[in-house]
Amino acid sequence: MITARLAYVSDPIALSDKELQDTAIIVVAAGSGTRLGYGMPKALVPLAGRSLLEHALDGIKLARCASQVIVVLPADAHELADRAERHPVKPLLCTGGATRNDSVRAGLEALRPGTERVLIHDAARALTPPEVFGKVVLALLAGARAVIPVLPVIDTIKQVATDPGQENAHITGTPARDMLRAVQTPQGFHAPTLLAAHRQAAGWETAAAEAVTDDAMLMEMLGERVDTVPGAAAGLKITTRLDLVLAESMLTPHPGKETPMTEQASSPPPIVVPRTGIGIDVHAVADAAEARPMWLAGLHFPQDQGLSGHSDGDAVAHAACDALFSAAGIGDLGTHFGTDRAEYAGASGTTLLTEAARLVREAGFEIGNVAVQFVGRRPKFAARREEADAVLSHAAGAPVTVTATTSDGLGYEGTGEGVTAYATALVYAVHG
Ligand code: CTP
Ligand code: MG
């Protein structure tokens, strides 16, 4: 299934109560996710319908190797905090800082006194399989004071220097590839030593602090030996859109994957034919006498008079819902959110879209994407389009894009009496 964790075949390691008690995991999730460009903290970015942070916590739950889980969040990240609090690992939450080191230190300061072992994990490595946590903890229990998961390096790595005034670097050396490893998290440590190292590093000037790119480096600087265990390809750090696509595809079942080779040879894997859907929503702009807030595409536009209707009038979100229902063949807005459903009276567009996506998944589909075209004179959309994409994508747990146009003065959209939103959606049946 979509939410099934990848490749978790081995059992969790069996720890005694005391070993569990003395082990903690800190998940750093306080970064801004600038390179991913979703306009929200990276840990909140959706992957197959759940945030990266929730996926990371799923792995930790399955690993069952720590009694304390601490999640370090950006200041004022209320939705992320809500999601973390609702997760069954019941993490302790604390606020991070401007750099990853600051965030790790904040987590370490929140450890229960007497904690012996601590694993530091990036929320951005959302699909790290549970057995990697297990291997790190076992190495610590066997006496390591620092242990990190690593993978062989695939590319040849060069050392470079850039001459003053030059744009491009030139090569100064080629380290032997078999002596190099790519480093992942969770990184495990003797907790008091790592805390002391981080406290010391807190006083360093910016350049020295920025040169520290992982926690193991601080231990190396103290002359501590750092051991390794095998990492996992699924533990990639989700940094760019491409990484997100890769992670999404790792969670998507591939038809025929589990078919034995002999059967595969005689019967080709079934072709999954996607289904498209369409939805249209029209709303009148409310009478000037009635002060209505303008909500569209999940965003509030404070300069604009709102749309009429018994909901918030979010035509973009409503059209997206109808397109999803249409693609899955499970009725329409009236079927699911009609006036007989009192719980949806006055519900926001994003609430409805989240519920529509849930219903579509419950009906056995995964969502490819939703595209919405808005037609109207107001609100002016261009400056907030990316924000709208992010908010709606998060609500649907799948990519939603919004485009906007005016109608060249023609019709009710042209006079500003009303707006229209047209949406299409693509879904595909999930087998297995
Ligand atoms: N992190 C953190 N506090 C910071 C910066 C980063 O807790 N001040 C965390 C991130 O949330 C992430 C991990 O450290 O889980 C690795 O950082 P990175 O992949 O760089 O994430 P971001 O800083 O969020 O992304 P970007 O650099 O693109 O803004
Ligand atoms: Mg960063």
Image (cartoon, grey):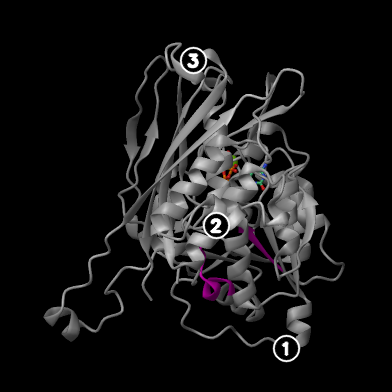
Task: Determine the CA span between mark 2 and mark 3.
Answer: 31 Å
Q: Residues within 10 Å of mark 3 (few under 14, many from 20)?
A: some
87 with respect to 150 (left or right): right
Residue at 23% x, 66% y is 271
Q: Secondary structure at mark 3?
A: helix
Task: Locate residue 349, reporting x and y percent.
Answer: 62, 42
Q: Residues within 10 Å of mark 1 (few under 14, many from 20)?
A: few
Residue ID for mark 2? 335
Quick one: label 2 or label 3, which is nearer the N terminus? 2
Q: Quadrant of residue 137?
A: bottom right
Q: What amino acid type should be assigned to the residue bearing mark 2?
A: Thr
Residue ID for mark 1? 16
Instruction: Inspect the magenta stretch and tell me whether residue 132 lies in it.
Output: yes
Q: Is residue 271 above or below residue 354?
A: below
Does residue 132 appear in the picture of this structure?
yes
Quick one: label 1 or label 3, which is nearer the N terminus? 1
Instruction: Inspect the magenta stretch and tell me whether residue 7 lies in it.
Output: no
Does residue 126 appear in the picture of this structure?
no
